[in-house]
Image: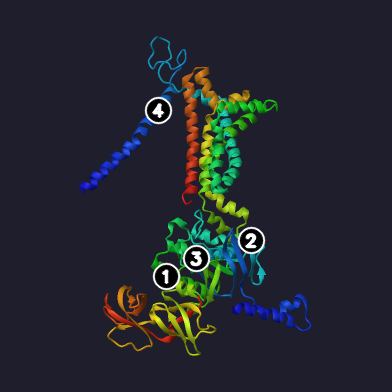
């Protein structure tokens, strides 16, 4: 008994030693700042940026807490419009990435084992060059074609940058499929299309979902690509947030936008997780 | 070999048709063709010959087994019948039609894979319904036949379960139901019992034979488990290095192995190099290494001086105490070195006086604690002439 308890305590200690550091790190640098941001979103902006004090230091100064920022967000359709546009761009980017990645991931997963590592390396090779350089390269390509500073250019850039994030989880999933399942399907009368649609595709849904999350969420917050490749009307949420902090220096408003974006992403992630549970519980 | 001769008969009949010529004559007078005919099939992988000029004919309703050690070509042969691999030479015919241009999904042949290959994202019922849906059967028929098939394999209560929720035996039965639901002309079974524990294995063997007899579907069963092959099969093809060493009924395979490989692979046996001293119509006189002069049943066309193998099943030998006088002409003396008691029988390993080892088996047929000899006991072994076998290689 005592022995078992000792073992239990020591194993619990090990668990905390292993999990502790990252837990502390995330609490300090993620959870805490997130809470600070929630508080910031209900405060007044300072005179020269940053935040106004919580208690007035001189008469007439705006201080304390307010829901004004949220009021602004819901009173003007333009914010909802930009949010909708952002979610639209993110959804379209995700779809295009999926359409382009699936055949490629399938190709890599079904190529001879000794080639796979090389092909995966090629997929992540773009990361070796600087992000901005890669996006500027598109300016050089799209400029002469008169396609620059358009929604089209933004989507092209988004898809280009995020493609590997879709390919890798898809490949990881497809590579694990037991090839004998396809033999079995064919043996039982399934033609090429049915083998894909009734076996490969449903089994790859978890990969599709994680790949989609890895593309959809970063695209929502992306501001560099719309700024470099997009036109005036192609501002997304990310640009607005960046502008609030660095342009108009209205930190509370920027914080509010961030919170709204996080809420939106969480809502979608929740739906995705629910859908994932439905399709993966038996896969 | 009977099958190649029936094929010759068929050819003869075609030429015998008086007055009739062309296709009509052929179709009217065709002799019954085997369900599956493997005609001189060879398959190479680089320099390795996996299947070497194999000819087999399987009759409708048969439980046919391909038996051999791993790498003997039995699985390659099975994959060619299913259509996943193509012969380099020769033909595979189903109902007399060459299958060369028929892809696996269009062959009326289903396979039960060693790993079962159940679709993990489908329920038991969806797995079983899969071949019916692929065949485009109407929804109502699919539901009805799936239900019937699940009843046959006693899995109706598991219809909504997923494969990962099933035991090994249940998965096995789902795989069987899925392979049979469409009533294929031929069901191929690739070591389907290999993953089951011994007791379940015996249960499934029984279920398998009953299912096969009740449905009348032809089974081609691949295994390396010799006792399973003997217990289940109507006929067995023993394969080695890509060739069929012997194709026969289980009792002939065991009782009259054609060569040293078959004798050694199936069951326990004593094997010794030997040469023929003299032959007559009643018996064969052999000089056997370590046993001396031994009499065996007559064997066609083996002149004196022929080298070969002398084979004797352990259960055909009798052990008596050395003090007791042996009654048979073939007898030798030795000492018990080891024994393996397995309940119903005990196998004794005996060191003969000549130094060679000899196995004899005694049935523990008397009630109570059965043990006839102890380690180191001085014994004599003897066997009747007709029990010995001369194998040509």
| Badge 1 density bin: few <14, some 14–19, many ≥20, Cα 10 Å | few
Chain letter behind tag 3: B
Q: CA distance from mark 2 to mark 4?
A: 60 Å
Name the residue beneath numbered marker 2: B103
Q: Are marks 4 and 3 on the same chain?
A: no
Tag nearer the camera, 3 or 2: 2
Q: CA distance from mark 3 to mark 2?
A: 28 Å
Instruction: State the residue lying farthest toward the top.
Output: A58
Compare residues A29 and B375 and report the one nearer the observer: B375
Name the residue beneath numbered marker 1: B203
B243 w.r.t. B290: above or below: above
Residue located 44% across and 78% down the image: B311
Q: Which one is earlier in the sequence, the residue at label 1 or at label 3?
A: 3
Report whether A132 appears left or right of B263.
right
Chain letter behind tag 2: B
Name the residue beneath numbered marker 4: A29
Q: Which one is earlier in the sequence, the residue at label 1 or at label 2?
A: 2
Q: CA distance from mark 4 to mark 3?
A: 57 Å
Name the residue beneath numbered marker 3: B150
Report whether A246 appears left or right of A63.
right
Tag nearer the camera, 1 or 2: 2
């Amino acid at each position: 008994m005592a022995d078992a308890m000792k073992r239990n305590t020591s194993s619990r200690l090990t668990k905390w030693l292993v999990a502790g550091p990252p837990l502390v790190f995330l609490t300090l640098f993620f959870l805490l700042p997130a809470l600070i941001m929630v508080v910031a979103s209900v405060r007044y902006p300072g005179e020269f940026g940053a935040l106004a004090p919580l208690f007035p230091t001189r008469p007439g100064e705006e201080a304390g807490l307010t829901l004004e920022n949220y009021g602004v967000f819901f009173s003007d359709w333009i914010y909802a419009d930009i949010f909708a546009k952002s979610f639209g761009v993110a959804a379209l980017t995700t779809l295009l990435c999926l359409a382009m990645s699936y055949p490629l991931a399938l190709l890599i997963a079904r190529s001879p084992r000794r080639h796979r590592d090389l092909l995966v390396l090629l997929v992540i090779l773009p990361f070796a060059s600087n992000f901005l350089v890669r996006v500027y390269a598109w300016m050089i390509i799209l400029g002469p074609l008169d396609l620059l500073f358009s929604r089209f250019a933004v989507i092209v850039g988004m898809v280009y940058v995020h493609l590997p994030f879709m390919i890798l989880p898809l490949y990881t999933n497809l590579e694990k499929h037991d090839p004998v399942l396809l033999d079995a399907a064919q043996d039982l009368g399934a033609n090429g299309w049915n083998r894909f649609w009734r076996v490969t595709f449903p089994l790859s849904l978890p990969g599709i979902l994680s790949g989609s999350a890895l593309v959809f969420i970063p695209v929502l917050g992306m501001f560099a690509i719309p700024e470099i490749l997009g036109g005036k009307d192609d501002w997304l949420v990310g640009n607005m947030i960046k502008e609030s902090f660095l342009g108009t220096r209205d930190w509370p408003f920027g914080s509010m936008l961030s919170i709204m974006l996080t809420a939106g992403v969480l809502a979608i992630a929740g739906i995705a997780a629910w859908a994932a549970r439905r399709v993966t519980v038996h896969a | 070999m009977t099958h190649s001769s029936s094929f010759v008969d068929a050819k003869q009949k075609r030429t015998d048709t008086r007055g009739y010529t062309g296709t009509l004559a052929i179709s009217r007078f065709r002799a019954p063709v085997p369900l599956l005919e493997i005609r001189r099939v060879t398959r190479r992988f680089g320099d390795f010959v996996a299947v070497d000029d194999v000819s087999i004919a399987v009759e409708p309703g048969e439980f046919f087994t391909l038996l051999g050690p791993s790498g003997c070509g039995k699985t390659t042969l099975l994959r060619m019948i299913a259509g996943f691999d193509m012969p380099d030479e020769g033909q595979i015919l189903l109902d007399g039609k060459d299958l060369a241009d028929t892809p696996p999904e269009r062959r009326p042949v289903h396979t039960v894979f060693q790993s079962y290959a159940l679709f993990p994202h489908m329920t038991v019922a969806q797995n079983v319904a899969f071949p019916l849906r692929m065949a485009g059967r109407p929804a109502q028929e699919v539901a009805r036949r799936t239900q019937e098939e699940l009843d046959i394999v006693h899995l109706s209560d598991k219809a909504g379960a997923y494969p990962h929720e099933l035991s090994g035996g249940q998965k096995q039965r789902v795989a069987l139901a899925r392979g049979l639901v469409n009533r294929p002309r031929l069901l191929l079974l690739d070591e389907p019992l290999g993953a089951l524990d011994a007791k379940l294995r015996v249960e499934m063997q029984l279920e398998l034979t009953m299912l096969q007899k009740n449905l009348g579907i032809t089974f081609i069963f691949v295994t390396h488990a010799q006792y399973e092959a003997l217990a289940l099969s109507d006929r067995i093809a023993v394969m080695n290095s890509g060739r069929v060493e012997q194709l026969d009924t289980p009792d002939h395979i065991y009782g009259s192995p054609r060569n040293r490989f078959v004798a050694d692979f199936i069951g326990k046996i004593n094997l010794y190099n030997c040469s023929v001293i003299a032959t007559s119509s009643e018996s064969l006189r052999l000089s056997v290494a370590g046993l001396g002069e031994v009499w065996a049943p007559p064997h066609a066309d083996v002149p004196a001086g022929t080298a070969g193998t002398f084979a004797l099943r352990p259960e055909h030998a009798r052990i008596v105490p050395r003090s007791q006088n042996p009654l048979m002409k073939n007898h030798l003396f030795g000492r018990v070195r080891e024994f393996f008691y397995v309940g119903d029988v005990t196998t004794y390993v005996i060191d003969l006086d000549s130094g060679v080892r000899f196995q004899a088996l005694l049935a523990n047929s008397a009630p109570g604690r059965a043990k006839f000899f102890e380690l180191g006991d001085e014994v004599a072994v003897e066997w009747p002439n007709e029990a010995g076998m001369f194998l040509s290689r």
